[in-house]
Image (cartoon, rainbow, N blue to C red):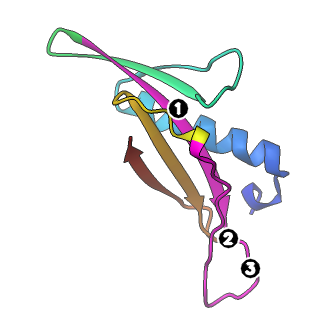
Amino acid sequence: MWVNKLRNREFSTFCEYLVCYKLKELGWKVFRPLVDRYIDIVAMKEIDGKTILRTIQVKGSRVENDDLEYESYGLTHEPKDLLHSPEHFFVWVMINRKEKPNFIILPI
């Protein structure tokens, strides 16, 4: 289980790239800002002749306890992570013990 051995910063980056990969699978063009200021991903897609733009803040979590019967996840979140824009989304990526990603996607 290599994902759970990543250090925190590398794990966060892994989760951001995982969201990029999933968006690309769905036909979105994805970009990473040069500076991480509450936007981890910018995504664009043409739908019905209109260009749709989305900004995304990604947070990643993995199982935080050793109890094999119960998986719990922690989340470090601050209000500034939620930009007040209808184009902004918050994505929480939770990696379970089997390294399967689970996504919670919240529009703002």
Q: Name the foreground residue: 96 vs 32.
A: 32
Q: Is residue 104 above or below residue 21?
A: below
SS at mark 2 in the image: loop
In contact (CB < 8 Å): disc 3 and disc 2: yes
In magenta segment, residue 53 = yes
Residue 71 magenta-drawn?
Answer: yes
Placement of 6 over or under 51, stated as above or below: below
Quadrant of the drawing holding the N terminus: bottom right
Q: Quadrant of the C terminus?
A: top left
Residue at left offset 51%, top offset 40%: 82
Q: Which mark is residue 60?
A: none
Q: Amino acid at mark 3?
A: Asn
**Which three-letter amino acid code belongs to the residue tagged 1?**
Cys
Q: Which residue is mark 3?
A: 65
Query: Does dot 3 land on a helix, a strand or a loop?
Result: loop
Q: Residue 20, labelled with which disc? A: 1
Tell me the residue at 72%/72% (across/down): 64
